Image (cartoon, helix red, strand yellow):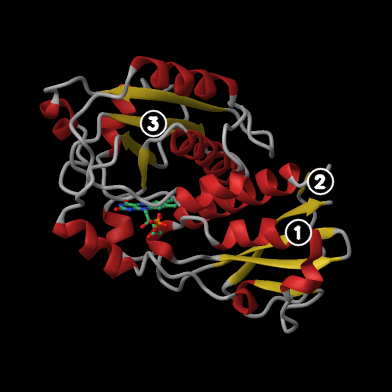
Amino acid sequence: MSFDKPIADIIRQRSSCRTYLRKPVDSDTLARLTDSLTSTRVGPLGNRTRFELVFATEGDSKALRGLGAYGFIKGATAFIVGAIRQDEKALEDFGYLMEWMVLKATDLGLGTCWLGGAFTKSRFARKISLLEGEFVPAVASLGYRASNPRWVDGKIRDAARSDQRLPWEKLFFDGRFDTPLSEDVAGEYARALEMVRLGPSASNRQPWRIVREGAVWHFYLRRTPGYRTSNYARMLKMADLQRIDMGIAMCHFELMARESGSMGGWRVSDPGIPLPDELAEYSVSWVG
Ligand SMILES: Cc1cc2nc3c(=O)[nH]c(=O)nc-3n(C[C@H](O)[C@H](O)[C@H](O)COP(=O)(O)O)c2cc1C
């Protein structure tokens, strides 16, 4: 799946959109998006994912209300719904593939919002006709951005501090976790790292950490204490959203690295670098 604009521009352009125009997405744009949905089914770590575009036609607000995302999301004309099996690294592959589509939608001029908690899973599950063993970890709303977001959109952004990102020295390291990596030392990969830093994450917790070891970039998940085990997460039967965040980081890193000419690929092989604390765990490595 290719993009019309440079990937860095698309990543910078994307931000979560929670209020949409009530105008249906035009058929040409939908056709281009649907094409990309069917052409990206196996993730870089080997998991097969099914994606479908669920439409709401003009005046179909009841159908959207029925999908259970109505309070947070207003006026979305479609949702990307994905289903995956409970396998190793399945959530990382899901995050990677879904983010690829979110970026494609952004490239096509649409607004999007990842939804991992605030939606009724069973209703979306019915829409995609779940097969035995599959589940829906998250969905993304879609449509034309409204020019005036609602008051509540600002409140949601404030609560998650959505406009802020952690600085480089808290995210990227050279050889070991106690040595921050400067942009200069990152060299040709500096832009790929910056694209990871700008990525969306559940509640904007930014759990990705990356350690460089020569030409290999090791990705770690540093969990937010209590995030996965909170009553809220349990009540909503939320997927392990921070693993989806890792897949989103992989997507941003790879797209930028490839656009800059890197021929690398993904490998799961823990290098055994001492972890900073018990919240951190190894995830995956990019071999450049
Ligand atoms: C896996 C995932 C799940 C998310 N779930 C929700 C959600 O349920 N409701 C919501 O309003 N935003 C949700 N978001 C959006 C994040 O809050 C948002 O990406 C973050 O605050 C950064 O803001 P930005 O996307 O505008 O850059 C989710 C994002 C991700 C990556």
Task: Give left or right: position of 262 versus 240.
Answer: right
| Residue plotted at (56% across, 76% down) | 167
Q: Position of residue 175 (x, y in %)?
A: 82, 74
Q: Amino acid at mark 3?
A: Ile
In the displayed structure, 116 sits above or below 177; it is above
Work out whether mark 2 precedes mark 3 in sequence or the reverse, and give the earlier one. 3
Q: Nearer the viewer, residue 28 or 136?
A: 28
Q: Position of residue 35 (x, y in %)?
A: 51, 18
**Residue 262, numbered label:** 2
Q: Position of residue 104 (x, y in %)?
A: 50, 34
Given the current orientation, which residue lies at the most extreme right position? 214
Q: Secondary structure at mark 1?
A: helix
State the residue position of label 1. 189
**Dots 2 and 1: beta carbons under 8 Å?**
yes
State the residue position of label 3. 80
Q: Amino acid at mark 1?
A: Tyr
Residues at marks 1 and 3, CA–CA distance in whole angstroms? 31 Å
In the displayed structure, 274 sits above or below 253; it is below
Q: Nearer the viewer, residue 221 or 109?
A: 109
| Residue plotted at (26% across, 55% down) | 235
**Dots 2 and 3: beta carbons under 8 Å?**
no
